[in-house]
Structures are given as structure tokens and as C-alpha cells.
Image: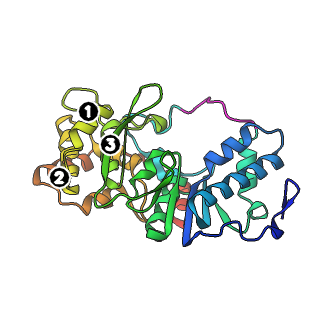
Amino acid sequence: MIIKGVNLNVLGDQFHGFVQGRTLIVDADGPAYVAAATVKTVGTAVRRFQQAILTQMFLTKAERAELHLTSSTSHKAGRFNILATKPYQGNRDGQAKPALLEATRQAVAQPCNWLPEYEVVMNHIVEADDAMMTSSYRLKEHGLIWSGDKDLRNTPHPYWDQKLGKVIQGHGFGSLYLEYTPAGAMKLLGYGLKFFWPQCLMGDTADNIAGLTRLDGKLCGPAGAYAFLHPIEGENECANAVLAAYARNKQNILPEGWLLWLLRHEKDTFWNYLTELQITPDNQAYLAWCCSQQWFRVPEPKQQEVFDDVEY
């Protein structure tokens, strides 16, 4: 293959020293966006996309890569059927995008535009984040996530921290920490499953997820979520603390958690995760109340048929 006049077939092994068996799990929407934003043709965008992926593989010493995109018509794991505090991704209408973005996404997903080192998956049923998390749990120590989306930090398996330039893993239940942006804004970050629970408190502005509307009467941002959860080390204690906070707020956690939860396997849900935990009797009663509320709309029969028949 020739890229920018260079015959890659005669260059030899460019990835000498890679970690044997390592597969880089990539959120490909970011590289596609960057590639489409500064070019005039789709062909050039595809080449820039390929270069970006090879660079990521080189930096992470990955032997292969698995790239994930979310189809523009994806069911997104049924999230649009959830009746949460805010409509899922309801803040994205009318946002400007590069003119060649969708054409670039479609082009890089075609096998004829893959490189031997990677393959691309266009996800029609779930979101790319879900598929990446599923791959992380499937590959375990042999998988390495690369994503600009903080949600993928929930994995207990290897994660590439782009700022630190190294592999990080959420040991045990995981950890939380605070940092500041160059502009001085506070951010709460972490690794492992522990990082999921502050998201239930803070919500996610990128996806228009409210989270907990009030933590004991106050808005809950990074500082409040960190102060509330950082001292807690156990998974069950952490989950019960967040559930109790939702109960005190008289708010249903199921729709918020359902939107935020990334699937560990194809049959996974936020509810499945809750059933694996040791929930206190008070919180069990609260969850029973949550289940009695209407928090999702039943899909149209045709849509449900597609949902049942298609595997991902």
C-alpha cells in the first residue's frame, strides 16, 4: 500500500517492540472528526484517519486495533426510549459538524479502506462506547481502550491515559481524583467501576443526562461528588450511598443509571449490575418503588423486532 508516495510494503516492521496480543480498542469518531475537519476530499480524510490510527497503535505498542463507530441511525442500546429527567442527547440538535464528517465515517468503515493492522465496526444497535466496553471485558488484559470520552474510564481493564501517555488500570473497585483544566475548571476523573457512581451524581452534559438533581438539597458538581464518594472504598457501600441519595431526593435512579451504564456484554443492563451488588433492605424497597414508576417508553413493534433479531 502506498500512502503519500511511500510504499508501506517495503518499510519492514514499523511496530517492532509491540506488546504481543495487545489489541487497541479505539473510539474512531474522534479521529474521523479530526480527519474530516481540515481537508477538501474524502480520500485525503481517509488517509489522515489511517495515519492517526497507526500513530495510536505505535504509541501504545499495540499489535492490532479494533475501531468502533456509532451509526447515524443506531438504536443506541434503546437509550432514546428512556424517560429520564432530560431527553437523551437532546442538546445536540443543530450543532455544526465538518461537512465531510459523515462521508468520512462511512468511507473508513468500508473494508477496502482498512489497513492490515485494524478493522472497523459500525455499530447499528449499540453505541461505540458500549461495544468498546464489551470488547474490554472480553479481551481483558489483552485489550487497551483509547478514547477521548471519559466514560470509558469505567473499565477495570487497561485504559490508555492520553494525558499521561501510559497504560492505567483501575485496581480493585477503582479510584477517583480531582484535576483542573488550563482554564481553571475543576474536573473529577478516575479509573474502574468506582468512576461510574459519581457520574450518577453529576450526570453528563455531553449526552444531556441530568444525574442526581440535588444531593441533599444542593447541586452536585465535581467537588461535591468527590467529597461524597472518595472516602468510600467498597463497591457495595458506594452503590448504597448513591442509591440512598437518590431516595432522599425522591428521584428514580433507573433512567439516569440506564443511560450512563456501558454494557459489559451484549445482554447487560444497569439493572443487571445492581442485582450483583449487596443492596440494603431500605434501598431494595427504594428500587422496588423505582421499578413501579414509568421510566421508559415501549418501542414500536417494528423497532422491537429489529432490536431482537440483530446481534452485535
Q: Quadrant of the C terminus?
A: bottom right
What is the CA distance from the residue labelled 2 to the residue labelled 3?
18 Å
User: Residue 243: x and y, percent?
Assistant: 21, 46
SS majority, magenta: loop
Disc 1, SS = helix
Judging by the rendered image, the residue that carries numbered circle 3 is 177
* Residue shown at the point (77%, 51%) measured from the top left: 46
* Residue shown at the point (44%, 69%) measured from the top left: 141
Question: As rendered, which of 277 and 168 lies closer to the eye?
Answer: 168
* Residue shown at the point (31%, 59%) measured from the top left: 273
Report whether 10 appears left or right of 181.
right
User: Residue 69: x and y, percent?
Assistant: 61, 53
Q: Mark 1 or mark 2, which is nearer the start of the sequence?
A: 1
Is residue 236 visible to the viewer in this orientation of the structure? Answer: yes
Disc 3, SS = strand
Q: Around disc 1, counting alpha carbons within 10 Å, would you say few (fewer than 14), some (14 to 19), or many (20 or more)?
A: some
What is the CA distance from the residue labelled 2 to the residue labelled 1?
17 Å
Q: Mark 3 or mark 1, which is nearer the start of the sequence?
A: 3
Q: From which residue to which does the magenta span run? A: 92-99
Judging by the rendered image, the residue that carries numbered circle 1 is 224
Q: Around disc 2, counting alpha carbons within 10 Å, would you say few (fewer than 14), some (14 to 19), or many (20 or more)?
A: some
Q: Which amino acid does label 2 sit on?
A: Glu
What is the CA distance from the residue labelled 1 to the residue labelled 3?
12 Å
Report whether 145 appears left or right of 219.
right
User: Residue 291: x and y, percent?
Assistant: 26, 50
